[in-house]
Image: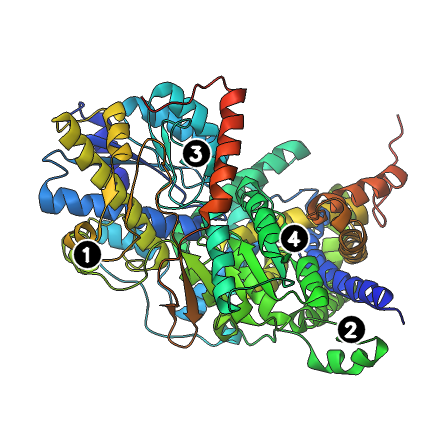
Amino acid sequence: MPDQLLFAIEVTLNGLMAGVLYALVALGFVLIFKASGIFNYAQGVMALFAALTLVGIMEGQVPFSHLINAIFGTDIHHFGWHVPALLAILMTMAVMVLFAWLVQRFIFRHLVNQEPIILFMATIGLAYFLEGVGDLMWGSDIKTLDIGLPQGASLWVEDNTAWLGGEGFFGFFIDRLDIAATIVAIILVAVLIAFSQYTKQGRALRAVADDHQAALSVGISLNFIWVLVWSIAGFVALVAGIMWGAKSGVQFSLSLIALKALPVLMLGGFTSIPGAIVGGLIIGVGEKLFEFFIGPMVGGATENWFAYVLALLFLVFRPQGLFGEKIIERV
Amino acid sequence: MKLTTLTFAAAVAASPALADLVIPDLSYRTGPYAAGGIPFSDGYQDYFTLLNERDGGIGGVPVRVIECETGYNTEKGVECYEATKGEGALVYQPLSTGITYQLIPKATADGIPIHTLGYGRTSAANGAIFRNVFNYPANYWDAASVAVKYLMQENDGSIEGKDIALVYHNSAYGKEPIRTLEELSKKHGFNLNTLAVDHPGQEQKSQWLQIRRERPDYVLMWGWGVMNQVAIQEAANIRYPMENFIGNWWAGAEHDVTPAGMAANGYKSLNMNAVEDMPVFAEIQATVIDAGKNAGDGSNLGSVLYTRGMYAAMLTAEAIRKAQEIHGVDDITPQQMRDGMEALEITDARMEELGMPGVGPVFSVSCEDHGGSGKGLVQQWNAEAKTWEVLTDFIEPDEEIIAPLVKADSEAFAAENNITAGCS
């Protein structure tokens, strides 16, 4: 095969993997929007906060230590223990459940029946508040996240594909972290689908998503469902935070990964879990191929804006997104 | 931010104006670039605190640092400037090329000097045109030239035919070295390939796949923030030889390499300041940190960017001393500060006396040259010891290439803005 074609295939494969990472972020948006009609601007910051909390717990960091030291004149920073990764993940999930309850109890419970734009504005406030709390709680320095995920090129893939090309082809590059992210994403989506199909809470969640009023009339607690869905979104944020944090260290720029999810949502629809996955894959492959073929002609760095161009193109033909529900309002 | 700092700032804001030397610190302790902004600001502020605590200020006048959070955001940086200039600000250190570009016309009109230590508008080195802007001890074009000179040293004096890729932050900052590298590629016969990375740089797969395909002999990086950590991880992922990967001096701090762990071993970067233990650190520890008067949590003392912030503060303090000496007054004005900066002379003896021997190159500033010596050194990360090891002495930049570029760019600026060049 000509090397140029092989490189295009390699770019496509890596685009698919990148798309999975985008989809992981988009999933959190979809879950909350589907259940409550809220576009959660804070989803990226939730990923950051979850990852910060995970590292903080693993490292035995004292939360709010700067604040405590400033007020009481102490000099404490660490408890002196290290928590195993799995236990730390479980503890972080508990923190995200508590966060979901607090969000519901102190913000959205008071905003029931408000316009969507009000709810959206509330999530903007929540995002900045959470970022500040994360900073105060765990500090702004970059933290290394090591929970044993593999990183670096898969030598097996490289060795077994090198023969496809000539001397200038070294085999396909696939990052093992991306493979791990793909496996985790598949499991996550399967669990989410099973949860919504086969559990009582999952069916209640779908009922609320379909029709709030009808769900309330049959005795489903809206408060409980919203806490549940924010908890699940918190868990998805944790997974996304782990995957992205493993690449770059856990730092405040993690919150900006939400920008990568927006075109995915525009393309896949705000209400569809499969849409988030397929949208992520299309955006991932599309932006990488565009950068590969067209990028060098226009000075590169096309990925950020091209993802939005691609999403807009889809919107022109399918405003509700690939898998979104078509809303018909009769007047 | 520490509560004590906030309390102090509030108390100072409420108190009547006293004779003091006002130094705004346009810092960023929040947002995606906070990891770089915090240690620099800590070093910058702690040094002034040391002078206040130990010497009662400079020339007997206390230094009042006003910290203003920019978040590395240009609009916020301009707001900080507008909010603090009325306090009697003597000099601004914006710590952002984007903010610097916006402040140059404003500060020039207001008669307040700007110091951009190793960043900002490179051609501001021409002091005959940029009367209020100083970018000593070195600038980006110097850095590009120092990197190429180092590669020449590594290749027995010739890099003809070598392929060099530049991975850069797609911003005013990241684009600064391109022109110089293009000129240097013509002079030395190497092939230059530029690869832009969009803000913030969390996703760089395409760029590193291209590097994997093309296998350049060397990769230079002009990165900042998360871009640095991701680039180093991606380079390790494609098994690019780390010893051939060289970042500029804003891509060579501890936090840039530690997330990649052992994979970052051997990564190189430029530096404009030395990274060794110095007597001044012990003084800061005892006088500032142990006394609880430090700007941050004290954990950054001695790190690359803390040292750079402290170095920037030292250069400012020395310029204040020079201004006091020239004008015979202790409580100087911004215009007098500018004169002090223009007459600044940094010698080995003076650095030794200040407890930071060899922290930077020896240089002097003049009206024609606001850029300093332009020298930089190369350091390498030892992942096992978690330390930077200095590989070279301070290397001189190639003035034959840089001087005409500075002249052409600054004269174009002068023509656009109706500025008459002159040193009288």
CA separation in Å, label 1 and label 4? 40 Å
Residue B412 image point, x, y percent: 54, 27
**Label 2 residue SS:** loop
**Circles 1 and 3: CB atoms closer than 8 Å:** no
Badge 1 or badge 4: first in the primary sequence: 4
Residue A262 image point, x, y percent: 70, 46
- Looking at the rendered structure, the kind of residue marked 1 is Val
Residue A54 image point, x, y percent: 49, 65
Q: Can you tell which mark lies on residue B280? A: 1
| Residue at the spot of label 3 | B124
| Residue at the spot of label 2 | A169
| Residue at the spot of label 4 | B195
Front residue of B225 and A100: B225
**Mark closer to the observer (1, 4):** 4
CA separation in Å, label 2 and label 4? 21 Å
**Circles 1 and 2: CB atoms closer than 8 Å:** no
Q: Quadrant location of residue A93?
A: bottom right
Badge 1 or badge 3: first in the primary sequence: 3
**Label 1 residue SS:** helix
Query: Callout 2: residue from which chain?
Result: A
**Mark closer to the observer (2, 3):** 3
Front residue of B388 and B370: B370
CA separation in Å, label 4 and label 3? 26 Å
